[in-house]
Image (cartoon, helix red, strand yellow):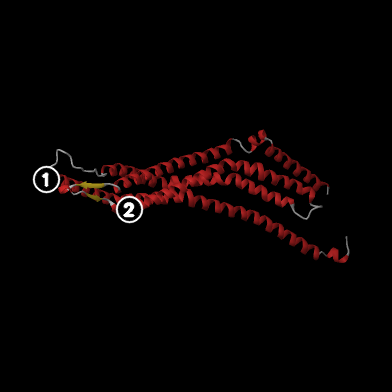
Amino acid sequence: MHNSKKIKYIKTAVIFVVLCCVYFQPLRSLVFENGAMMRLDIASEEYIESSLVRAGAAFASARVTNAIISVIQGSSLDVTPAGLGISIAIFEALDPLNDLIESFSWVMLVSVSSLGIQRILIEISPWLGITIFAFIGFFLWGAGYWTKKYMTVDLVRIGKNIVILGIALRFAVPLMVIANDYIYDSFLDVKYQHSFGEIEKQNRELKKAIPKDFERTEEDSGLMAKARQIKESLTTMAEGVNNLKEKAGEFVNNIVWLIAIFVLNTILFPIAFLWGFVHLIRGIIGRNIACKFENEIKNKIIRKHDPRKSTGVA
């Protein structure tokens, strides 16, 4: 009895020290916000910042492509043979590509929002996990040693589970971000650089294909001059259309790759990592509950079949 009480005092003292480290800022900075943990946060924050730069660059490039195509689609060829004005709309076949770029813009908006949320979670996870959940968990854990006789609720078990949850909240997002960074660097970065570079190159070429309006001038008022102007205009249109048709397939391929990369990197992978982390914590907490329930059943069975109890032997 004396030894068990001594152990209880020691456990309570240790938990009290941990509570002081959680509650007081200087001790919390020394224990829970030391160099190793700060390096973890800094590494995850740097990855988020680089991801935001990549997403912003891809989004801006897509908007440039969308703007160029909109200019081309709105272009018209104005010729005036024999005094009759005719306006010819060109490049209407680019609607599917323009729609794809609009969809890509929405994907990038969601990706940037996801990265922003991750950035906020990295900042608040130390406060939420340690200052709130860990403090409450350790407090209940320590109080449970002294309230077992007076309460039917097992505060020790509840406190341990809350501490596990607090530690998980503290490290879940930074670890998820770092794991996501490793996957991106290993498998996705090369494809992103290639696709983004190709879109930038194709945008520069696409600007050259913007048709110019051809209007009648005072110098070119003769019939032959008008005919030559119309021929040059139609030739320019044909070259522009053929050039865009050749580039459309490459545009679609690169944009689809960028959509896949950002959906995986900023949406699906983070959700998958957090889902796995949540199930891991649930498994740990559930195992603790199951072990506690199993021990209670065993104790009841042992007490029920205790021969000393049935014979009245003390």
Dot 2 crowding, Cα within 10 Å, few <14, some 14–19, many 20+: few
What amino acid is at disc 2? Asp
- Left or right: 159 in relation to 147: left
The circle on residue 248 is none
Q: Residue at x 29, y 42 (%)?
A: 207
Q: Position of residue 196 (x, y in %)?
A: 37, 44
Left or right, residue 257 beside residue 288: left
Instruction: Between residue 264 and residue 80, name the one nearer to us.
Output: 80
Disc ID at residue 223: 1
Q: Is residue 286 above or below residue 25?
A: below
Horizontal side of 173 relative to 3 (left or right) equals: left
Q: Dot 1 surroundings within 10 Å: few (below 14), some, or many (20 or more)?
A: few
Task: Give the mark toward the camera: 2 or 1.
Answer: 1
Measured along the vertical axis of the image, is residue 219 above or below residue 251? above
- What element does badge 1 sit on? helix
Q: Which residue is mark 2?
A: 95
Residue type at tag 1: Leu
- The answer to which quarter of the image holds residue 54 is top left
Earlier along the polypeptide chain: callout 2 or callout 1? 2
